[in-house]
Amino acid sequence: MIQNDTIAAIATPIGSAGIGIIRLSGPGARHIVANFFKSNTFSSDASHSHRLHFGIIIDPQDGSDLDEALVAYMKAPRSYTGEDVVEINCHSGIVLIDKILRMALEAGARLAEAGEFTRRAFLNGRMDLTRAEAVIDVIEAKSELGLKIASRQLTGKLAQRIEQLHGNLMRVIATVEAAIDFPEDDILFDASSALTAQTQTIAESASGLIATFHDGCLYASGVQTVITGKPNVGKSSILNALLGDERAIVTPVPGTTRDIIQETITIGGLPVRLIDTAGLCDSDEEIELAGMERARGKIKHADIVLMVLDASRPLDHADRAVADLLADKKPVIVINKIDKPRVWKYDDIAAFLPFNTIVDVSALHHKGIDELKQIIARIIGTHHSISPSDILIANARHRGALEKTRAALDQAITGFICDRTPELIALDLHAALDALGEITGRTSSEDILDIIFSRFCVGK
């Protein structure tokens, strides 16, 4: 399914750097580049594939030299997209790279759409949809563990597991459909118990993959850790201390933070998304109320909650109101401002709020911050490592397709047990097969492809 047109795009971040890359893919890639790249080893009709060709970028308008460059030519189908691909490696600069891209477009290329190179790789059979999605996951990995998950998907580990389930399910379907085609042989009746067991095994495998989704998201996207408390207890100061950077504005004025501030750090090899929220209190101010509503939404979906208390101020109804909101969260209690005289004791907290643990800190003097990081690491269980055989899913689309697979298989199992007609059982089995196919792209619609590849940058 190789496309008829040739696309081009800048494949590296625009800016001043040592190297910039302009990528072309399509049947006219080599001919287009030959219009402005002069080399003894590269031409529109005779170039060695999978080699770097040294030459000069020429401005076709006046014949002037623009830059020295190395050009890589990869002949179809042995390329990223499965088409002829040319990559121009030149010096990176906004004016130079933009000029070369415009020369490629003027010579007949079309500007690539977001993710179009990888989409062509999928459409041309160079990779299945799980590997295509893994490309962006590798690029956006926030930790080494997240990178490992994405890399395993990129190398086809998840696709292999899905294809194995697909093959097993096809064998079950073949037997059921044989019973439809040859009812006089009672094939389904003779094999129903075995088919039930086989279908149950496939369903359990799907459930096993679904069960990895939470851990997969933690490793890939990060642990959502919300910092909350009443105004002016030092939430933003704690965010800054954990980051080691002055990310949030800190003032003595209560209510300085009115919106959500998010930053990601790595603790024990895992990404942790720190979320600083507006102070929770009684207020009639519209902006403050909007900020607090957002804070409550973040708390509801948080993996970890850090409730900040001020050691130098008495506990009051505002602290208790925050505690009531966190009743089912068992937050980490962070007692801030221990550099000032204390006015209350630990027992005062336990009386109205269950919590996992408690830690004393002084965000101002960075005391207790390392201990707080250790507590976060302990809660998220960073002592667990991924073994080479582990396959974790971290993609909501994959989970949704697996859940549809499991539901359809459960229906089929019920059909076997209740002795339903093979036609009805086959419908459920095919629904499960289609759902599995959505994961690898066997049965994905154009709308799904549009959504997936819209995440990509233009050059990828």
Image (tube, rainbow, N blue to C red):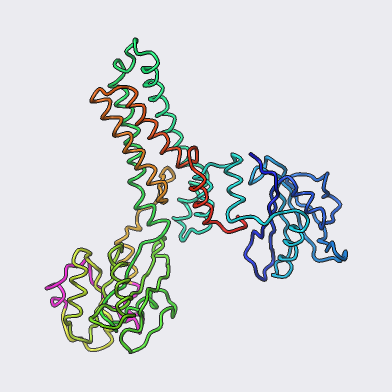
Indicate left or right for 215 with 163 as reference.
Answer: left
Q: In which quarter of the image is the C terminus?
A: bottom right
Task: Find the magenta span and give its range.
Answer: 346-370
Residue 267 among those drawn in magenta: no
Residue that appears at 44% across and 33% down: 164
State the image coordinates of residue 149 (x, y, percent, origin top left). Answer: 45, 50
Residue that appears at 17% across and 67% down: 354
- Residue in the foreground of this view, choosing between 8 and 209: 8
Residue 367 among those drawn in magenta: yes
- Residue in the foreground of this view, choosing between 356 and 281: 281
Residue that appears at 49% across and 54% down: 137
State the image coordinates of residue 382 (x, y, percent, origin top left). Answer: 35, 58
Whether residue 123 is situated above or below residue 35 in the rendered picture:
above
Q: Using the rendered view, name the quadrant where residue 39 is placed.
A: bottom right
- Residue in the foreground of this view, choosing between 109 and 40: 109
Farthest residue to the left: give it: 351
Whether residue 370 is situated above or below residue 134 in the rendered picture:
below
Q: Using the rendered view, name the quadrant where residue 283 is placed.
A: bottom left
Residue that appears at 35% across and 37% down: 205
Farthest residue to the top: give it: 184
Whether residue 389 is situated above or below residue 246 in the rendered picture:
above
Q: Quadrant of the N terminus?
A: top right
